[in-house]
């Protein structure tokens, strides 16, 4: 390589006949409007219209647009890493810029663990397309055939004549070229990857450790006011009266504004509230305490979540729908040697993002500009537009870093609040939710009450399994009178249970929602993985068999799970078949990691669970120690098969994070409602796992050539049942009602 | 008017003496590296040093910081090269990063008073800092790495 001649910029200009005049240092867009791509199956929205992911400046800087939101999963690094690899760019000369909310980037809604799943090929295409243009530009400059040129390390070279031009030198000419036909693009083979599959550090790492980054809470605009909003404690209430004279006297207070919400279904519309606007956060918070507000009643004011769940645990409503049916459940249960039944309960949960919801907005000549920690910037355009009465195209959404998100920040009600207030006072406004606001006015993970009955044959194998669930649906947040779980919800491990059991029936029971139900990391998989894994573990104990061997036996022969002939149409995905072989392999890998069955002392126990979600397979084995009714989780081994991997270090980090997240909800997570209002308020009564409770975590990342699966969410669901099964194995109680802290103290 | 010494610089602010130091830093001085997480001393996101000791800025009235030396994440080192910042980079600790200013400030105060802490001492000193993303294993590993490194006294920066 050393003898390739690097043509300097002056020579290039001579060669190319361009004058130095008119060359700007700004990035030149390689307008990559490549053809429409089918979106990942199951995703919302329609086709992609793609362009402008790659810019190259004449000074050699490559700018890659990150169009998905960074919330700690590393996507601002991962997707550009793919582009840079196919582009043969030097990572040290790559800048990442965050995209505005804009349809031109295709789907920007960063949830469902599908950024890599949905954009791996698009990102490669963006890189390969830009590279093809640079090669053609060089070939034209030299008067040679493009096939004789190669791109390597931020340059195009012509080996025959030993010439080379840097990307920056080619940018101007390349930007004039038509887009290559995507069918003509050449891609690297995996052995040629330089960045894909490598543990590239996060692009924001250096800034984060210096505290020099911008999250939603950090945006500062000239003349900005700080808002703190008191909201109606129950869903659907409206403002009846506001007494604000004392609040207005607090120094720093500029205005007090009503947000007349209370609509149902709530969707993403701001809740009813009264906003105090002040010159600083503290004044706004202090004045807010002096507001005297009365709210109107609503149909949700008597909601008592514990009483509701208790009632559902005793008796399910008759109104129900069968969502899957295989064999003859009555015959299977009646013919069983041994019968068993159990009820499993998971409460409402709140996302508890470390950074609470926060947004800053100002009205502009042409519309509205927002800076916010949002997962869905295009949805934010729509919701903000609705709040201030303009068109979505008139809303400019700048996406900050997200101080964690877990699904909460894909609901942009907080951005709509900021925009509404900015319009009302005609000044820039920043809204920061307090921790109490976030805990009490969330979009909650749905509680779930699952009734299981099973029948075992003489060998102890489950031959019949009846599963019934009562749980509010996310659809209730968006449409009236929605009381049944939807296909996409029961498809998360309930209507598509993988076990090879001849007689099965699954049904959903009418469950009205009394709060905003939203998706939280891993969503209904949390509930369903807990129910079904717990029941399988209980069956193993009843049969006197090793739980891990029993899981393997019940999964049965290698095959693809397909429920289309059993009444659940959505239980089959031709592109990503649900593979029992991969499921069992994940269990085998965690078995090997632990050395299962491991020796334990008195009071110690291991539990195991396995779950498929977001196209990936995860098995978890957990060890607990119980002393004097106090349980401590000491070890968690987690094995993940997510197909091919872009950034193994970030995948490891996601598994570590999934373990901690899963332990928080298993051991201590509970949002409860009394009189329609959330009881909890802050980290004292809605605790999260702390470092001294953090177990030894061992991650196995399974080598795979399968298509990419999800990473951010699939690690969470098996955690809870692995813990509660470990507690039972250690001689503790069988915990069927989460969190564990209701029955044991947590060490 | 209150006189504060922040990262080696003298700053004058016009604030209610009861205003927590957190909001003085963030809203009045635009030092936004220090984060809000709970406002009640429960999460550690707002951790800064007052005379070298880790304190929760959300729960400290600004008046109580007058006359003391305040260090924030922006002043932990001049070039982001405090041994802990280097160890954080080496272990790729952060996920979303939001809690990390507070984590680093708690860890820096620990190492300043105990340069070679045991695992239990690390966990004890860091028990007030929540990381929702679950970076605890790497935080512990990074502190152990940094503890083997000579600590330069923190200087006022920026
Ligand atoms: S914000 Fe100060 S401890 Fe949480
Ligand atoms: S890195 Fe996200 S909260 Fe700690």
Image (spheres, coloured by chain):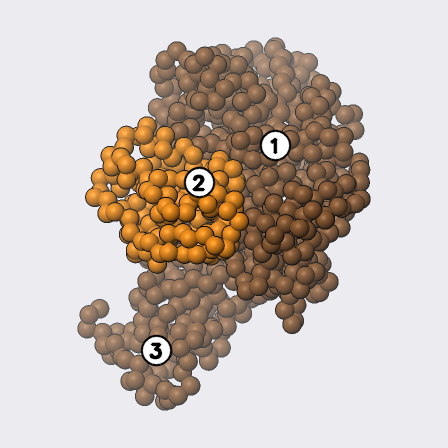
Chain colours: A brown, B orange
How far across and how far down the image is residue B107, in percent? Answer: 34, 40
Quadrant where the N terminus of chain A lies?
bottom left
Category of crowding for the residue at label 1, using alpha-carbon neighbours closer than 10 angstroms: few (below 14), some (14–19), many (at least 20): some
Name the residue beneath numbered marker 2.
Answer: B56
Q: Which mark is residue A194?
A: none
Category of crowding for the residue at label 2, using alpha-carbon neighbours closer than 10 angstroms: few (below 14), some (14–19), many (at least 20): many
Confirm if mark 2 falls within 8 A of ligand 1. Answer: yes
- Using the numbered discs, state the Cα–Cα distance from disc 3 to disc 2 in whole angstroms: 52 Å
Q: Earlier in the sequence, mark 3 or mark 1?
A: 3
Q: Residue at x 67, y 39 (%)?
A: A517
Name the residue beneath numbered marker 1.
Answer: A680
Left of B126 or right of it: where is A222?
Answer: right
Q: Given the image, what chain letter belongs to the residue carrying mark 3? A: A
How far across and how far down the image is residue A452, in percent? Answer: 64, 21
Element marked by disc 3: helix
Q: Give whichever of B153, A354 is nearer the camera.
A: B153
Element marked by disc 2: strand
* Residue under disc 1 on the same chain as residue under disc 2: no
Q: Residue at x 50, y 55 (%)?
A: B14
Of all residues, the one furthest to the front in this rendering is: B1
């Amino acid at each position: 390589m050393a003898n390739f001649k690097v043509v300097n910029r002056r020579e290039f200009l001579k060669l190319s006949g361009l004058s130095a005049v008119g060359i700007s240092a700004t990035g030149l867009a390689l307008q990559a409007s490549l053809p429409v791509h089918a979106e990942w199956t199951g995703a919302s929205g329609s086709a992609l219209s793609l362009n402008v992911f790659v810019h190259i400046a004449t000074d050699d800087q490559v700018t890659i647009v990150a169009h998905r939101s960074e919330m700690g999963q590393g996507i601002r690094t991962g997707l550009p890493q793919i582009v840079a690899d196919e582009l043969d760019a030097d990572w040290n000369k790559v800048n990442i810029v965050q995209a505005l909310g804009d349809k031109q980037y295709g789907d920007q809604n960063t949830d469902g663990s599908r950024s890599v799943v949905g954009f791996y090929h698009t990102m490669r295409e963006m890189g390969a397309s830009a590279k093809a243009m640079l090669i053609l530009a060089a070939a034209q400059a030299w008067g040679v055939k493009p096939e004789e040129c190669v791109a390597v390390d931020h340059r195009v070279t012509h080996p025959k004549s030993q010439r080379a031009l840097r990307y920056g030198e080619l940018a101007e000419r390349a930007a004039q070229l038509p887009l290559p036909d995507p069918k003509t693009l050449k891609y690297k083979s995996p052995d040629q990857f330089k960045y894909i599959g490598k543990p590239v550090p996060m692009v924001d790492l250096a800034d984060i450790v210096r505290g020099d980054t911008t999250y939603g809470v950090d945006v500062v605009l000239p003349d900005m006011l700080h808002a703190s909003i008191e909201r109606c404690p129950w869903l659907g209430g409206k403002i009846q009266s506001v007494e604000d004279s004392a609040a207005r006297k607090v120094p720093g207070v500029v205005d007090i504004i009503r947000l007349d919400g209370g609509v149902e279904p709530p969707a993403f519309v701001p809740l009813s509230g009264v906003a105090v606007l002040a010159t600083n956060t503290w004044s706004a918070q202090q004045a807010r305490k002096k507001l005297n507000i009365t709210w109107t009643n609503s149909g949700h004011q008597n909601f008592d979540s514990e009483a509701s769940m208790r009632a559902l645990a005793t008796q399910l409503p008759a109104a129900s729908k069968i969502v899957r049916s295989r064999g003859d459940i009555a015959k299977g249960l009646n013919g069983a040697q041994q019968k068993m039944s159990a009820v499993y309960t998971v409460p409402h949960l709140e996302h508890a993002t470390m950074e609470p919801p926060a947004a800053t907005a100002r009205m502009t000549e042409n519309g509205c500009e927002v800076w916010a920690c949002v997962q869905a910037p295009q949805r934010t355009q729509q919701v903000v537009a609705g709040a201030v009465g303009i068109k979505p195209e008139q809303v400019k959404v700048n996406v900050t870093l997200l101080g964690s998100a877990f699904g909460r920040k894909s609901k942009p009600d907080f951005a709509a609040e900021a925009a509404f207030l900015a319009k009302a006072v005609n000044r820039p406004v920043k809204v920061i939710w307090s921790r109490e606001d976030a805990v009490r006015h969330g979009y909650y993970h749905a509680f779930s009450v699952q009734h299981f009955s099973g029948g075992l044959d003489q060998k102890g194998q489950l031959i019949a399994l009846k599963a019934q669930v009562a749980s509010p649906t996310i659809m209730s947040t968006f449409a009236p009178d929605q009381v049944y779980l939807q296909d996409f919800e029961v498809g998360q491990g309930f209507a598509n249970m993988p076990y090879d059991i001849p007689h099965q029936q699954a049904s959903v029971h009418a469950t009205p929602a009394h709060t905003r139900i939203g998706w939280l990391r891993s969503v209904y998989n949390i509930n369903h993985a807990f129910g079904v894994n717990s029941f399988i573990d209980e069956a193993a104990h009843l049969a006197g068999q090793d739980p891990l061997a029993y899981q393997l036996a019940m999964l049965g022969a290698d095959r693809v799970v397909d429920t289309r002939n059993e009444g659940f149409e959505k239980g089959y995905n031709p592109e990503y078949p649900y593979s029992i072989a991969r499921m069992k392999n994940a269990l085998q890998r965690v078995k090997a990691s632990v050395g299962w069955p491991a020796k334990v002392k008195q009071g110690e126990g291991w539990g195991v669970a396995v779950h498929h979600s977001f196209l990936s397979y995860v098995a978890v084995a957990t060890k607990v120690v119980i002393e004097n009714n106090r349980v401590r989780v000491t070890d968690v081994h987690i094995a993940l098969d997510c197909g091919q991997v872009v950034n193994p270090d970030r995948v490891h980090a996601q598994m570590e994070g999934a373990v901690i997240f899963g332990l928080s909800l298993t051991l201590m997570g509970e949002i409860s409602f009394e009189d329609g209002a959330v009881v909890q308020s802050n980290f004292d009564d809605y605790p999260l796992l702390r470092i001294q409770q953090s177990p030894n975590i061992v991650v196995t990342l399974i080598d795979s050539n399968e298509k990419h699966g999800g990473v951010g969410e699939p690690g969470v669901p098996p955690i809870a049942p692995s813990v509660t099964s470990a507690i039972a194995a250690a001689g503790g109680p069988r915990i069927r009602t989460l969190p564990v802290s209701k029955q044991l103290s947590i060490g | 008017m209150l006189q504060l010494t922040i990262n080696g610089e003298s700053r004058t602010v016009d604030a209610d003496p009861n205003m927590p130091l957190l909001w003085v830093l963030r809203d009045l001085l635009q030092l936004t590296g220090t984060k809000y997480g709970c406002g009640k001393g429960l999460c550690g996101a707002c951790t800064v040093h007052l005379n070298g000791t880790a304190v929760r800025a959300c729960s400290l009235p600004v008046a109580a910081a007058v006359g003391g030396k305040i260090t924030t994440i922006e002043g932990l080192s001049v070039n982001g090269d405090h041994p802990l910042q280097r160890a954080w980079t080496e272990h790729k600790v952060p996920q979303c990063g939001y809690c990390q200013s507070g984590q680093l400030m708690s860890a820096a105060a620990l190492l300043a008073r105990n340069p070679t802490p045991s695992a239990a001492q690390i966990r004890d000193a860091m028990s007030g800092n929540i990381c929702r993303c679950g970076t605890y294993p790497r935080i512990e590993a990074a502190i152990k790495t940094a503890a083997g490194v000579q600590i330069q006294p923190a200087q006022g920066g920026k």
